[in-house]
Amino acid sequence: MANIELNADLLERILNEPDIDLEEHVHNINFNNNLEIEEDSTSTEPNNFNTVDLISELPCEIIRLILSRFDTSSLLTVSLVSTLFNNLSNDFEIWKQKCLFREEDHYYTMEKTTFLNVSESNVQQDDKHVHHSLLMTKRQCRLYSSDLEPYSNDYKAWKRLYFELGSITFDNSFDLISNAVECSSCDDDQVIDNTLECNKKFWSSKGNADSNSIDYLVYRFHQISVVSSVKIHVFKANFQAGMPTYSPVTLRISVGFSPDVYHYKSEEFTVKRTEEAQQFSLEPRLVVGSYLRIDLIGKHQIQSNDNLYYTVLRYVCADGLPIGSLDPCAELSLSMMKLRSKYIDIKSDNEFPDESSQEQYEKSLHQLKSQIAPKLDKKRIYNGIIQSVLKDLFEQQFSSAIDTIFQKNIRSPKIFNLLLQSKNSEALSKYFCSLLDRGDVFSQEESLFFTREAIESNNISLFTKLFLADKIHSSDQLGEYLLLVGLPIVAAEVFSRSLIPDKVILCLFISGSHLETVHLMNNIGATHQFSYDYLIEMFKSYSMYQAYLFTLTILNNLPEFFDLSPEILKRSLELQSDSIESQKTELSALVKVVTDYQPPLHTHKFFNYPPSILSGFFQYFEQKIKSNK
């Protein structure tokens, strides 16, 4: 009787104290019981301490309740104790609860791996920096779902589903989007299909007078997929005055099995006003479906020529895994197919019309695997080539690595970044020599790196030759670098090629070419609206002397499109005079006393590498120039 009361007391503590150490209390109960048996001197039967198991005598419901508080590792250990505990630890209610989403759980496992499969013990000490630079990150996420149910009906189905939900890795994920379906509106030829590739094209909503208006975009996946995250690139209009960024205020992501019904809707994510990629993660929830809808809520930016609000996106990407790539997760894959049947009318389903039986479910899944197989094979081949390149880099077979990159046509920002991680002068020089021999235009990343190395190693003439030959990719980042290292005229040309007139004017201003600045503004003023307030605030941050001098130049060569009033000048430059003529006199006096004659220029470094890392390439380039003379 005392034993029953003791177990009842333990049960009460279990219910009231979630953090109770169950294993310790079970051990104490058995120990105390053994002690009582040993002290019972009236018993003539031999003591058998190993057969005392009070926990097994409890009702199964109570044992299940106790086991439900165990973590996964403890459950697996308990299942080895006996047949009873094995059966109870596999109970579907226990594992069902573990499949549900809980905010307090830890979901991610980050594991550093390498394509080379080289152990630390086999790496020479001198090569450790090379080995570490080639490490890749493998991310495993435990997913949870409140909607998914096991496809199978046996009592271990929830346990299998739990472990398959935790076996998904996203180191080999895909862009899931197959095609664009529809959008709320589009401005002329700026259609939603422009967002499928990351290039200069873009989608734009129609203008709206309401800054709280909502637009939406709908996409279809290649097949039923697990969605990990959604990435967008907001469009920045460098060709417009002020270089505005047309981002929404927030966005909401919805996923479903049809373009009309979405069973998953995320919270609203805040969107930054930047052209850089922005990623919105849906993990650790299992988000599965065939269609993606992005609601773009609110607008920041007014377009100056019509005073209407717009949202503009350049690229949309959904990252995740198609159901056909989840092999060997059969329980999870079939469960996702079963979930789909809840939201799709099977009788009118054109994609998988006969999913009512197990045989048809498995047949449909086999079709999906066959459908995605070519893409998986292509991914495996690509990873094999990457492995070969990394192996050659690790073994310092640089010629072989570079030849593979160009022969297999896998040149990309990712490959170039791998070369940068090697920090090897021979490898990088060989790479740029190959680019030069092939006559290829340098990519944006290659152009930034080469320009930095050329300028900081005093090889500006080599940069100039490639720039004039149109082998350097002009970009906003390249122009900013050239401006900050004291080459405003060259930066102006880069910004001009990049169609960023505001920064062309800024560069000419910094160089002191004020008359040329005014002429340029006069030439493009008909299509590009300038605000004196905007320009002068930008110029004042560089040099008050140059700002005063520029204003005098404007007053003496006033373009027709400039509506300059004494009030604007007085406010912008904090002048005391009230008329244009008196303000000219005041500005002339200020120019003589202001001391910040030159704008402050600061050297800016994009990368953290020694300036001589491309010395081999510079020598090769100079020899090639001499031989061509």
Image (cartoon, rainbow, N blue to C red):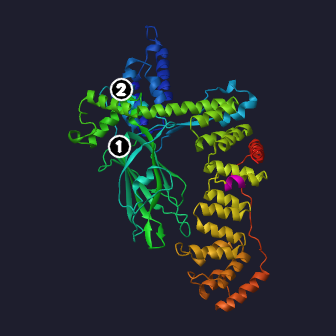
Q: Quadrant of the N terminus?
A: top left
Task: Identify the main secondary structure in magenta.
Answer: helix
Q: Quadrant of residue 69?
A: top left
The residue located at (44%, 50%) in the rendering is 196
- Label 2 close to label 1 by CB (< 8 Å): no
Secondary element under disc 1, as helix, strand or loop, is strand
Residue at 59% across, 44% down: 413
Residue flagged by tag 2: what amino acid is it? Lys
Q: Badge 1 is on which residue?
A: 290
Q: What secondary structure is marked by label 2?
A: loop
Residue plotted at (24% across, 40% down):
349
What segment carries the magenta color?
464-468
Disc 2 designates what residue? 156
Question: Could you tell me the amino acid type at mark 1?
Answer: Ser
Question: What is the x, y in percent for residue 418?
Answer: 63, 39
Q: Residues within 10 Å of mark 2 (few under 14, many from 20)?
A: some
Q: Is residue 537 above or below residue 417?
A: below
- Given residues 193 and 81, the one toward you in this image is 193
Q: Residue 32 in the image: x percent, y percent?
A: 49, 22
Comparing 199 with 20, the one in front is 199
The answer to whether residue 572 is above or below residue 195 is below
**Nearer to the camera, 629 or 192:** 629
- Examine the rendering and report whether any part of residue 149 can be seen: no
